[in-house]
């Protein structure tokens, strides 16, 4: 049958992790990528500020400093063996991207340019270090383009605009995936020895988000339905600087170049919350500080936003106060032109969406849902592990934002997401190909499409009054209010009840588009189902964790509790309920201590 | 404010001819055209189909003809349209599949035809290949391309013949031809001097006007023409 395909390795998702995995897997195994978007539409392309690697091109730096900063940034929930691996692999990985053609910005000496970013420090002085390797403020765009170009060069197989619906697991091992071809609504079976999930995040759960429409957690939800647990889902990052009301990301690179956050009184309030690194503290720390400022009435005009100020006069005034220097030792002084050339897209976004020229006026910003620290549990080779003992499910891999290695723990540092993609995408690809070359295909079930068809039929036979659009908005609203930057038992209970209600209402949506050609309404309903699954897992995991750590901040349990909670959450969906388990954090060199910036 | 969208509709399964439908919605001046399309799909007609993803002008999914000009629906605000009537149509020159969705394959085929990747078989150094800020600046503008097809599908030469590689493919070629690390310029210039290459460009500038990334597309094409003509990258 024409809708049956056989490959050694199937990669689901064509962002940074998926493309990197495909490049490496295809060197030794017959590989194909399926993606619901054209690869160049993937969300990796929206990453702005940089990819972290201790090259030391603009001041002393070491992979070991990067390791410690990442452990500290994770609020000690990251697995230290995996973090050390990633931070050491970072250096050759960035050189490899450069060799592939990535047009990094350059220093005067022709080296890859590097800028400061939140939480990245000189471990001796505690001051910010230049570790983010950047291509202006479109680093993710350039990574995505470069990797896609390499895939074209290497003749990687693509199935573009195919939506994954189901994963096939036979005899305890991966057997393939089921996907829907958007052009004609036909189902396809991709029979494979290895399956790599690289489907990205699920930030569309929240109302104010930097995430693309397509960020609906399709991979994690499909695996959850097939009995694979999700790890640390209560940890979701809210980036401090989203465009007010729209959530569009304004890179931390703005603060790396000297921009500061200001409240209604004109105060640089981060001085009070992070005296050493101030506006370059970790994202969780800054987002909480912003909420506290707004709660105390110091939002701009009393509203729920603050100013991000990158006007040259502001940058230079505070740089002088901080005693900030250029790498050559001269005082740090910028001009409007320099900021324009380093942050052209930010200037464009501010002009387009805010009507503000950021070198002349401050930008209204608020925290925006940004990044899933949690996801499909894996080890540092990208192998999916399915229980408290880290048992590997043979042939199943995950990498990138959909995965939880865990290198980000309770809070990810800026620039580490792009790094995660290239390092773990590569290793998942290598390991998947190696496994495939020594394994045989699992026998597929008599009707591999059965489960997917059953779920699709439910949607196509729906004939109620509810609108996907409305259900989606109600989910986003309650999740942003109750399972956002700050959380309480009461609020999260309310959210959980609401999610249950919305899941029921989703079964009664109005009769959808029945067409076969680009039925995007069917897709919208499917994706909302995925988001609701993950919203539930997120909330149940968050309710159970009675402490505050990284991105999970509880007003009723404001302290970190290492005695009871220095452990990873695992959440399974069993018989319609979420069941929780826990596994230890890997601690090698750094014992947990208080986290101060 | 109240806004009326007149949207091109075509569903190959319906048996109906392509036509326009009107929808009137309440809009904020700061709403994106994409927000209105989402609202219409969500509330009035779920069959309305269009591509979109990042919603802030980076992924390149939602190129459309809006009031006769190629724009990204997510990068155009209601207030910038200066009127209560908005006409939304698919981009031209590519086969319409359904509503605002067109067949992008010929566009990507053209992209692939210009060897869109760094060519350099010399052994790579242990660290980065050096490149001065000036060398990097030389091709900066054309690295911004998001392959949305706004330029190519605004080009009359492309409308006449979709085998013309089109502005986007030439922009991609430019990005490599003028990269000091690349060694494939001669090969690419040969392709672009052929029957479906740069000489189909008649300097109409539609592409430059259409580019949502403000790339100087016509200038880039001119630089490629010049390189072919002079045999030099200076």
Image: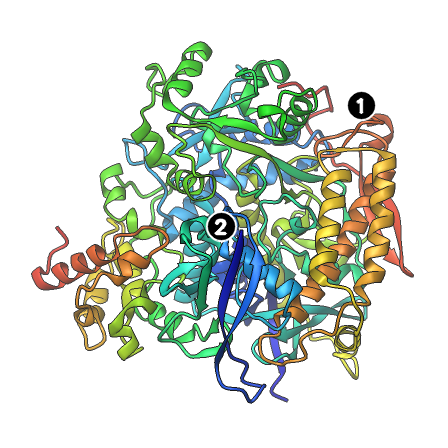
Chain under label 2? B
On residue A559, the disc is: 1
Number of other residues with Cα within 10 Å of mark 1, as a class: few under 14, some 14 to 19, many 20 or more: few
- Asked if A19 appears above or below A211 in the picture, the reply is below
Instruction: Give the secondary structure at mark 1.
Output: loop
Q: Which of marks 1 and 2 is in front?
A: 2
Percent position of residue B35, x then y:
56, 55
- State how the image is colored: rainbow
Q: Nearer the viewer, residue B170 or B38?
A: B38
* Disc 1 to disc 2, C-alpha distance: 37 Å
B18 sits left or right of A79 in the view: left
Chain under label 1? A
A270 sits left or right of B201 in the view: right
- Residue at the spot of label 2: B56
- Asked if B52 appears above or below A237 in the picture, the reply is below
Instruction: Give the secondary structure at mark 2.
Output: loop
Quadrant (top left, top right, bottom left, bottom right) of the N terminus of chain A: bottom right
Quadrant (top left, top right, bottom left, bottom right) of the C terminus of chain A: top right
Percent position of residue A284, x then y:
65, 30
């Amino acid at each position: 049958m024409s809708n049956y395909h056989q490959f050694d390795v199937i990669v689901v998702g064509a962002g940074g992790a998926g493309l990197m995995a495909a490049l490496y897997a295809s060197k030794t195994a017959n590989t194909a990528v399926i993606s619901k978007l054209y690869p160049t539409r993937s969300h990796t392309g929206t990453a702005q500020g940089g990819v972290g690697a201790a090259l030391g091109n603009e001041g002393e730096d070491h992979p070991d400093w990067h390791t410690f900063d990442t452990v500290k940034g994770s609020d000690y929930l990251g697995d230290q063996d995996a973090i050390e691996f990633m931070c050491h692999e970072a250096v050759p990985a960035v050189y490899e991207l450069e060799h592939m053609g990535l047009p990094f910005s350059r220093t005067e000496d022709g080296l890859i340019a590097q800028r400061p970013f939140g939480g990245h420090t000189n471990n001796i002085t505690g001051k910010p270090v230049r570790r983010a390797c950047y291509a202006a403020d479109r680093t993710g765009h350039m990574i995505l383009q470069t990797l896609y170009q390499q895939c074209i060069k290497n003749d990687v197989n693509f199935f573009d605009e195919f939506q994954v619906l189901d994963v096939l697991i036979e005899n305890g091992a991966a057997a393939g995936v089921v996907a829907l071809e958007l052009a004609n609504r036909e189902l396809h079976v991709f029979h494979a020895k290895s399956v790599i999930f690289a489907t990205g995040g699920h930030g569309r759960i929240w109302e104010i988000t930097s995430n693309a429409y397509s960020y609906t957690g399709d991979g994690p939800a499909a695996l959850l339905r097939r009995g694979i647990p999700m790890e640390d889902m209560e940890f979701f990052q809210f980036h401090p600087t989203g465009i007010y009301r729209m959530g569009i990301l304004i890179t931390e690179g703005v603060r790396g170049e000297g921009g500061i956050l200001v409240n209604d009184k004109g105060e640089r309030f981060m001085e009070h919350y992070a005296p050493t690194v101030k506006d370059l503290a970790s994202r969780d720390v800054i987002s909480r500080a912003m909420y506290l400022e707004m709660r105390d009435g110091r939002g701009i005009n009393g509203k729920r936003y603050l100013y991000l100020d990158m006007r040259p006069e502001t940058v230079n005034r505070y740089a002088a106060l901080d005693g900030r220097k250029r790498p050559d030792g001269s005082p740090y002084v910028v001009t409007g032109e320099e900021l324009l050339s380093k942050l052209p897209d930010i200037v464009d976004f501010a002009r387009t969406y805010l009507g503000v020229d950021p070198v002349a006026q401050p930008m209204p910003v608020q925290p925006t849902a940004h990044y899933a620290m949690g996801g499909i549990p894996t080890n540092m080779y990208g192998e999916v592990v399915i229980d408290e003992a880290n048992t590997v499910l043979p042939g199943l891999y995950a990498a990138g934002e959909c995965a939880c290695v865990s290198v980000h723990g309770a809070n990810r540092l800026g620039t580490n997401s792009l790094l995660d993609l290239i390092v773990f995408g590569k290793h998942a690809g290598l390991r998947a190909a190696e496994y495939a070359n020594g394994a045989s295909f699992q026998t597929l079930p008599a009707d591999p499409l059965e489960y997917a068809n059953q779920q699709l039929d439910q949607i196509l036979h729906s004939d109620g009054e509810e609108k996907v659009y409305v259900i989606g908005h109600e989910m986003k609203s309650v999740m942003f209010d109750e399972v956002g930057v700050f959380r309480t038992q009461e609020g999260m209970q309310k959210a959980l009840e609401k999610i249950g209600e919305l899941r029921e209402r989703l079964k009664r949506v109005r009769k959808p588009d029945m067409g076969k050609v680009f039925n995007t309404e069917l897709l919208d309903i499917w994706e909302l189902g995925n988001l609701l699954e993950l919203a539930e897992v997120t909330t149940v995991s968050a309710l159970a964790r009675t402490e505050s750590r990284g991105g999970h901040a509880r007003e009723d349990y404001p302290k970190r509790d290492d005695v009871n909670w220095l452990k990873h959450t695992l959440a399974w969906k069993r018989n319609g309920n979420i069941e929780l388990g826990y596994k230890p954090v890997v601690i090698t060199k750094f014992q947990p201590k208080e986290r101060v910036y | 404010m109240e806004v009326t969208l007149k949207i091109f509709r075509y569903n190959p399964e319906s048996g109906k001819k392509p036509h326009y439908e009107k929808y009137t919605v309440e809009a904020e001046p700061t709403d994106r055209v994409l927000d209105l399309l989402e609202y219409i799909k969500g509330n009035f007609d779920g069959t309305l189909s269009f591509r979109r993803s990042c919603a802030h002008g980076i992924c390149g999914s939602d190129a459309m003809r809006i009031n006769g000009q190629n724009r990204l629906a997510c990068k155009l605000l209601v207030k910038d349209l200066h009127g209560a009537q908005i006409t939304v149509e698919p981009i031209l020159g590519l086969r319409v599949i359904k509503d605002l969705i067109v067949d992008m394959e010929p566009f990507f085929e053209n992209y692939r035809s210009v060897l869109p990747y760094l060519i350099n078989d010399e052994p790579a150094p242990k660290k980065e290949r050096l490149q001065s800020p000036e060398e990097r600046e030389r091709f900066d503008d054309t690295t911004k391309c998001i392959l949305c097809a706004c330029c190519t599908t605004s080009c009359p030469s492309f409308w006449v013949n979709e085998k013309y590689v089109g502005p986007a493919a030439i922009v991609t070629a430019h990005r490599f031809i003028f990269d000091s690390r690349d060694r494939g310029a001669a090969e690419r210039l040969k392709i672009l001097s052929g029957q479906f290459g740069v000489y189909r460009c008649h300097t109409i500038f539609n592409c430059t006007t259409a580019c949502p990334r403000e790339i100087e597309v016509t200038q880039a094409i001119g630089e490629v023409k010049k390189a072919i003509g002079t045999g030099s990258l200076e």
